[in-house]
Image (cartoon, helix red, strand yellow):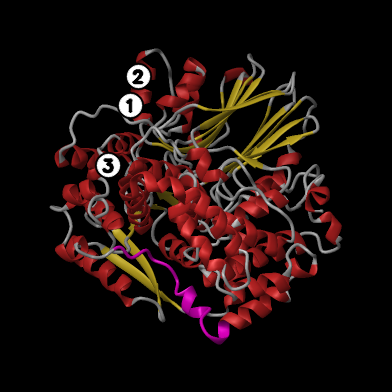
Amino acid sequence: MCGIAGIVSRKPSAPDRLRAALDSLAARGPDGTGIWRSPTGRVVFGHRRLAILDLSLRGAQPNVAPGGSSAFVLNGEIYNFQALRTRLEARGEHFVSTGDAEVAHALLRREGLPGIEELDGMFALAWWNEEAGQLLLARDHFGVKPLYYALLPSGIAFASQPSALLTLPELSARLDPEVLSDYLSYGYVPFDRCIFAGIRKLPPAHRLLFEPATGRIDVAPYWTLERRAVSSREPQELRTLLRAAVESQLCADVSVGALLSGGLDSTTVTSLAVRQLPALRTFAVGYRDGDASDRYHARLASWALRTRHGERLLDVGELGDRLAQAADIYEEPIADARGLPMIELARLCRKTVKVVLSGDGGDEVFGGYGWHLTGLRYEGIREAMGPFSLLLPPAQQLVSRIARMPGLARAAGIARLTGEDLAARYFPVRGFFHSFEQEQVLGRATQDPAWLFRKFDRPELPFVHRLLSIDLHTYLPDNGLALVDRSTMAAGLEARVPLLSRRLVEHVFSFPPDRLVRDGTTKVAFREAISEWLPPAILSRPKAGFSPPFKRWLAGPRFEAGLRTFSAGRLAADGIVDPVRTCALLRGGTQKRRNKLWLLLRLESWYRRWIVDARPDIQASEVYGENALSSMA
């Protein structure tokens, strides 16, 4: 787990070009800094190290082939590196270190692009092949590790976080207005987009090829999640894969712990890890004015599994300071309120361990969210209507007009039944601001907010799998995993997610729908498989995602106080939002109004940190990216 950055250009670059970028990534890699410059000077790679495997200097990066013909940097962990090393040694490779980066580099030198598909782990990597004159960037299958890039006048730059790219003189902190619409829709910035104009994300399971000589850039997926034939759908096979996933991710030359919320996912991961590490440390946080059952179940699970448990009880404190801290750490706005306590949880862990296992991904893989049940319920109603369901899309047009009327915005929620396709029906369940609401907030027409769900909907799949596919490609990488990565990396802590093992996910995705969600029950197959490992009180616990009590914070008089804070903010002052129409919308009958206010307050804190504070003399007309003002007219 580290931070990486690099520049590949048609012109020579000085190593100093990367120093500020690497300094901005210091928290990701506090154990060392490495910079490599190609013999021609046109390629510069940088690495900030968090030493997890081979703590000696032999494990330092960039990893460079003899003669400088090939260079490689890696952020993350390759869990099958030992098996790959054995295979490569049989083919004549010799290794200096005992870590994973050198193995992954050797694999790519021998096998080229196909070698990416053999990597099992969480990774963002860069490989410069001097002979081919080509840069390869690649990101792991589910997007556990981030990777951003930007096209420069003479080449390309890449880094683990946007802040590193913003240190380059060719780039500046400017807001992309189209991505602002995405954030209002989903509460995070999705897929290949970035809130900063001129910067993009490499999507999960994608690779990027860049040839500086021609300027050619090619971005394409290297892997797609498909339903495959499985050897067995019995619980024992799933148990075997769960054990293998956790055991493979315990490999470390430093101390390992686990996040333990007392839910099914974290308790399962902990129960398997503690068999290999009997003195395992576990960690949890809670709020004094939050749900005490979270702490109770975490303690119960720890007692049953005999872990060394630590917890921290949090106070709301000065909410403005908390929001500012989150904006600084996450760099792109994420509305999910879990972002606040996760920062404190990571700091608690880092006091005694350097690696933690997390149960993230379990709900997306096994079908564990309440919104999966909601989607199924409405789909069942449509099926029961038979041929009369053809009348629903025309009815939606009427409802859309009604929802635009003052105080009737809540009517838009009926689209979960009447929408013309799954994306249009799923957005009211999962999304936030509808298109007509965004017009009121931004004062301009915006794109279809359901475009993201439409992009990842796969009508050829069973309905449950369609929902899981959407979540695995949207909410998981750009909300859940982004929170995990940024919060832990800010503390110099590596977080691993065993439930996102590729073999495990492929196996579960091939289950029949009723093995995932059935008759109001989520995670059907998962519950059967883990029943012999977990205490009954944990198994029977209702789904309760951990979140600060932000809805209570914004209840009563605090809601109006939040509206005043938003109206007096810099987004309103700079003309980016219409505070009068927005407040009227939120005071009216709109759905999820406290969620939406929270989303806007998170955006305001991000804007102050990254646009206003970064460029104090900025003019309002300069806030937006190139050619953006014409699109806002």
Mark 3 vs mark 1: give the one in front.
3
Q: Are marks 3 and 1 in contact (CB under 8 Å)?
A: no
Residue bearing mark 2? 87
Tag 1 secondary structure:
helix
The answer to whether 197 is drawn above or below residue 105 in the figure is: below
Estimate the spatial distance between the alpha carbons at disc 2 and disc 3, rounded to whole Å. 38 Å
Residue 271 in the image: state x and y as whole percent.
22, 54
Q: Residue at x 33, y 26 (%)?
A: 83
Position of 295 with respect to 525 (left or right) is right
Mark 3 = which residue? 513
- Residue matched to label 1: 83
Q: Residue at x 29, y 66 (%)?
A: 309
Left or right side of 100 for 563:
right
Sequence-first disc among 2 and 3: 2
Q: Main secondary structure of the magenta part?
A: loop
Secondary structure beneath disc 2? Answer: helix
Residue 147 makes an appearance in the image: yes
Instruction: Kindly identify the amino acid type of the residue bearing the numbered disc 2.
Output: Arg
